[in-house]
Image: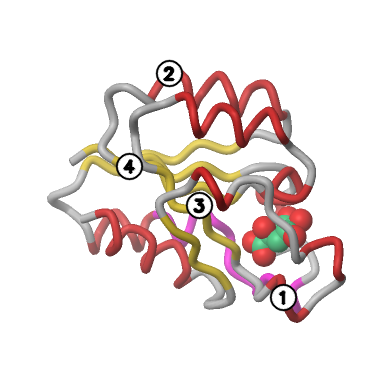
Amino acid sequence: KKILIMNGPNLNLLGVREKSIYGDQSFEGYFETLKAKYESLDLYYFQSNTEGILIDKLHEVGFDFDGVVLNAGAYTHTSVALADAIAAINTPVVEVHISNVHQRETFRHHSYLSKNCKGVILGFGLDSYRLAIESLI
Ligand code: DQA
């Protein structure tokens, strides 16, 4: 199975950024752990800080891959365009968040993406990504 993990804006700074919320591990390091755990899967990782590039990537994989694990960062709360891209493709998308967004500012409580996703996993730290993979396999 081919699964893409896609991270949006500022998630390239995991391990550096607001450690009390997002932890002290880099995603690159965590991705190595995931690849070792899921040797039988074709796991890919992609990160961009740019909305259009994330949309282009969804179009690229969205008719071929078996699943996408998407942490769209702040675009979750702002992007109708990303929501439309998720609706447009065939590949199921699981929305993930590292933090429990419902314990945070009210502007983080709404997601434009959830309606078009297979499901949502949030609040389990980096383990949210593993749980999302489990849900796809
Ligand atoms: C996040 C939550 C978002 O509200 C925030 O903008 C992020 C990360 C999370 O993984 O907890 O960038 O998606």
- Quadrant in the picture for the N terminus: top left
Residue at the spot x=38%, y=61% of the render? 132
Q: Which residue is mark 3?
A: 28
C-alpha separation, residue under disc 4 versus residue under disc 3: 20 Å
Residue at the spot x=30%, y=43% of the render? 43
Q: Nearer the viewer, residue 110 or 131?
A: 110
C-alpha separation, residue under disc 3 versus residue under disc 1: 26 Å
Which residues are the magenta region?
19-31
Q: Nearer the viewer, residue 60 or 46?
A: 60
Residue at the spot x=32%, y=58% of the render? 133
- Which one is earlier in the sequence, the residue at label 3 or at label 2? 3
For disc 1, does the CB lie below 8 Å from ligand 1? no
Q: Is residue 33 left or right of residue 47?
A: left
Q: Is residue 65 above or below residue 134?
A: above
**Image colouring:** secondary structure
Check disc 4 and give the amino acid type.
Gly
Check disc 1 and give the amino acid type.
His
Check disc 2 and give the amino acid type.
Glu
Q: Is residue 15 left or right of residue 26?
A: right
Q: Is residue 11 left or right of residue 132?
A: right
Q: Which residue is mark 4?
A: 67
Label 3 crowd bin: few (<14), some (14–19), many (20+), radius 10 Å: few
Check disc 3 and give the amino acid type.
Glu
Label 2 crowd bin: few (<14), some (14–19), many (20+), radius 10 Å: few
Where, by quadrant of the figure, is residue 14 drawn?
Answer: bottom right
